[in-house]
Amino acid sequence: MSHKSKHNKNNPASKQEHSEGREETTNRHVYVEPGVQIDLVKDLKEKYESSQTQSSTHNDKVLLWSKIGAGLIFVYAAITLLQTCLVYRDEGDRPWVGIETFTTNGIQEGQKFVFTMLILNRGRRPAKVAVKGPKMQDYDKFPKNPTYEKQTTSIGLILPDGHLKVSLPLTVIQPGLHETLKNSGHTLYIHTAIEYEDVTTHERHWTHWCVQYSPESYLTRPEDTFNQCLTYNDAN
């Protein structure tokens, strides 16, 4: 019996079979057959692709809204520019009515006083014109809103570069006028107010005009005794 036991102990074939059996048992847990997929890797891949798709969709939305915002800003700027151009065009094309020149024979006591002014439309559209005055009056201080005895008188339509003459009602300069002005400290004024309407837009405008008497020129230059007032020469 001891011989049989010795034979099994020293038998190389038996050891090799035992070793191969152990190796086969170990490899059984790590070997993957060809064509088999691992679910974990597949899940990670799908999550990554889904994340990339969502990120791409978000970026596309952001880009779309950015383009829409830029487009709205451009449209707003274009509308603002158009409105500005229209305003400037209207301002340039509107009628501009005012006093171009005036003539007078000067202040001479006891004589008829003649005063005529030329109303001119320097604008590009016709104007429907009405005039208050002219009025000759002495004031201690020229009022901010002078009054006119008569109602506004309509003088009709003035075409572009057209003009009309308006004269002060017939007036005789009373004797002692210069002495009266000197003693009272008053100044003699001639003023008028022009109201007119743009026949195209029906927008209303006005022009104020005023000259004042300079007694210093009475003896030397009676025809040149009126100068522009420091106030009431304005328009809208």
Image (cartoon, rainbow, N blue to C red):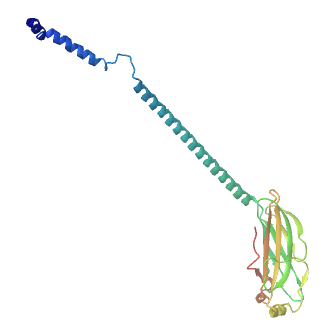
- Of the 4 image quadrants, the one containing the N terminus is top left
Residue 226 on image: x %, y %:
78, 82
- Asked if residue 163 lies left or right of residue 2, the reply is right
- Asked if residue 221 lies left or right of residue 154, the reply is left
Residue in the image at 10% along x and 7% along y: 7
Image height of 57 relative to 198, above or below: above
Image height of 221 relative to 93, above or below: below
Residue 89 on image: x %, y %:
71, 56
Snapshot quadrant of residue 40? top left
For the image shown, how many numbered marks are present on the structure? 0
Snapshot quadrant of residue 84? bottom right
- Asked if residue 233 lies left or right of residue 8, the reply is right
Snapshot quadrant of residue 227? bottom right
Q: Nearer the viewer, residue 62 or 29?
A: 29
Residue 235 on image: x %, y %:
76, 69
Q: Nearer the viewer, residue 3 or 151?
A: 3
Residue in the image at 78% along x and 79% along y: 211
* The furthest residue to the left: 3
Residue in the image at 83% along x and 93% along y: 179
- Of the 4 image quadrants, the one containing the C terminus is bottom right
Q: Nearer the viewer, residue 187 or 49?
A: 49
Residue 160 on image: x %, y %:
79, 61
